[in-house]
Image: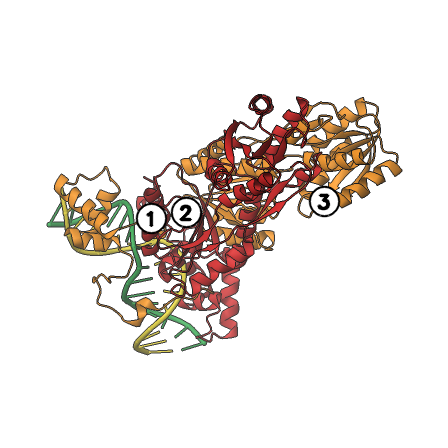
Chain colours: A red, B orange, C green, D yellow
Amino acid sequence: MVQIPKQHSAQPAAPHKSVPGAVPTSADVARLAGVSRATVSYVLNNTSAVRISEPTRRRVHEAAKELGYVPHAAARSLRAGHTRIVLVPTPDVPIGPLYSTFLNELQWALSRLDYTVVQYGRVGLSGDAAARAWAELRPVAVLGPVGMGADGIAVLRRSGARAVITLGPEPVEGAHALLTDHRHVGRVAAAHLLSRGHRRIGVVMPKEPGLDTFAVPRLEGVREEGAETVPLRLAYDEQDAAQVAAQVSELGLGAVFAYNDEYAMLLMRALQDAGVDIPGDVAVMGADDLMLGRLLRPRLSTVRLDLPSGQELAELVDRLVREPDQDAEPEPREALAVTLVARESA
Amino acid sequence: MVQIPKQHSAQPAAPHKSVPGAVPTSADVARLAGVSRATVSYVLNNTSAVRISEPTRRRVHEAAKELGYVPHAAARSLRAGHTRIVLVPTPDVPIGPLYSTFLNELQWALSRLDYTVVQYGRVGLSGDAAARAWAELRPVAVLGPVGMGADGIAVLRRSGARAVITLGPEPVEGAHALLTDHRHVGRVAAAHLLSRGHRRIGVVMPKEPGLDTFAVPRLEGVREEGAETVPLRLAYDEQDAAQVAAQVSELGLGAVFAYNDEYAMLLMRALQDAGVDIPGDVAVMGADDLMLGRLLRPRLSTVRLDLPSGQELAELVDRLVREPDQDAEPEPREALAVTLVARESA
DNA sequence: TTGAAAGCGCTACCAA
DNA sequence: TTGGTAGCGCTTTCAA
């Protein structure tokens, strides 16, 4: 599976002799400083249980610096029996500025807490195969294994993960669930549109694959709120937008709820280019409350989403890692706050 | 530094006895299958140098499945002497859809090639401290250590990194350099504006910290092309945009080059709200060629950037890992293609 | 205050 | 075809 250069076996070099080109180990440091490996470890880790004399400390530090010694994380965690790795999924598809900002923040906050963030792409593995691949790294925490079943979670748990946190519409057994139910988004938008007298609502669904994870629940939310929905598939380009705009007119739709602000902007422009008045002829709503919505004319009405901050989530991870039993199976809690932002377009 | 639960030392449990709650090892599998650990390794890795009988294979596989055995990546790479880890920097600050799409693509492509992508945030460490922290993971490749000097690169190299690739304006010794010189962006924009008779150009610089890495070179490019530049600091909000718009009028600026399309849109809207005609009174140019530029009226003139695709970059990494000496110090090559996209706003 | 040595989980050599 | 075993680099107990 992995090709390994036979550098070691080629010549069974005399033990305890440092090869020039090789990466220095703590043994090399020990030799140079004239102490034992144990002492090196004590000094470099500031082990408080042991007192090492100043001269020895200095010698060790100097030797380490001279050799450019860098400890080997894998060896350390093998010995320790656990890692500081937090696994974070790479979304299969670019998912918008909102989410990528959130991820960024999260990574930053986790790094601050001295965790190593590993982004793991699924790359076509099924839920359980993915779980096994992830478990090989022995992560101390795993975030948002979307679409992973209870079995996968169990594998992760058995492999030593002390915190498994899902972000998704429904709780998964064995994981700490942060519910992000995007149906709320659709409901809020629909409620607003309904209150303005629109009973039939066109719902813009991205043609781009992968976004359905969010788009479908948003559509469902609109339906649940009691509106009649007309799905409109829209690719993120101008040509397609012109076609959908025509479709909106043909169908006599008086209101449209777009997947998010970007798709709303795209469609709104196409409608305006076709001479449609907004909100007079067609009311348009977006979602995500991006800056661009404020810059459009008319100003875009939208739905704001508040995810937990990366900071908060990082702290949750840290807490679960430290006290794993505490909330083994806590009440799943809604983590997605949703607010109407009524401006001019609807 | 890391608190380690003393689960092992608490009771020096009899060796070779599998503890129920613990993570199963290959020894557990061997015991259950009634074979040696070596055999387990052979079977599970499909080692071609050794032939194992079918019945034995089956027994091993069954035992592994029953125990839910998952190999330990750290132990494996400790033994192997190298990892499949590729270190990728987390940008300190959200950096726009263009770059995050690129990163995403890259991660996906690397995962496909069986690399483990680790995102490492700098978290306030200086270049060389960061290099040491990164080297602890013994990555086989490191991408884009921005602002890291030759020393840092050397540490990484000595720790076993076979590919060190920088993306930045200038080559760094010891690394494979992909030059991304954003001055080109400014030059192309300035050339266009100059050809339209604008000699004095307002240059919008984001107030947001971290973006200066790109903003400053873009400004320099404008200057190098022979224009007189007037820096305009702009925060990404409407209030500030209104102020800057007023400033543009006061200064009698006839042309503005914004850091990117988003800032251009922001300023353009503010100018229009103030009754300024575009491009009649003020010509506006953006950069990055985002979709939103096409949707503005007038349509936004901009500069398109083409980074190498994630796929290409992943292949480069793979090639360097396989043949490290080949291009130890190759000719640094320009990796950022820059094209003028002239539309209506300038 | 320091050193010797065991052992974390795994793979690959060598011997049977 | 299979097993024994050394050893990757590190930390930590125990003994000196």
Q: Chain of mark 2?
A: A
Side (left or right) of A111 relative to B196? left
Q: Chain of mark 1?
A: A
Disc 3 to disc 1, C-alpha distance: 44 Å
Element on which disc 3 rests: loop
Residue B99: quarter of image: top right
Q: Chain of mark 3?
A: B
Q: Position of residue B45 (x, y in %)?
A: 26, 42
Task: Report if the CB atoms under discs 1 and 2 are less than 8 Å apart.
Answer: yes
Residue B71 or residue A65, whichever sits in front: B71
Q: In which quadrant of the rendered image does the C terminus of chain B lie?
A: top right
Side (left or right) of D6 relative to A208? left
Numbered circle sitting on residue A145: 2
Name the residue beneath numbered marker 1: A152
Most extreme residue toward the front, as rendered?
A197
Element on which disc 2 rests: loop
In this rendering, the answer to whether A6 lies above or below B228 is below
Residue at 52% x, 64% y is A61
Can residue B147 be seen here? The reply is: no
Name the residue beneath numbered marker 3: B237
Residue B38 or residue A54, whichever sits in front: B38
Q: Which kind of residue does numbered mark 2 sit on?
A: Pro
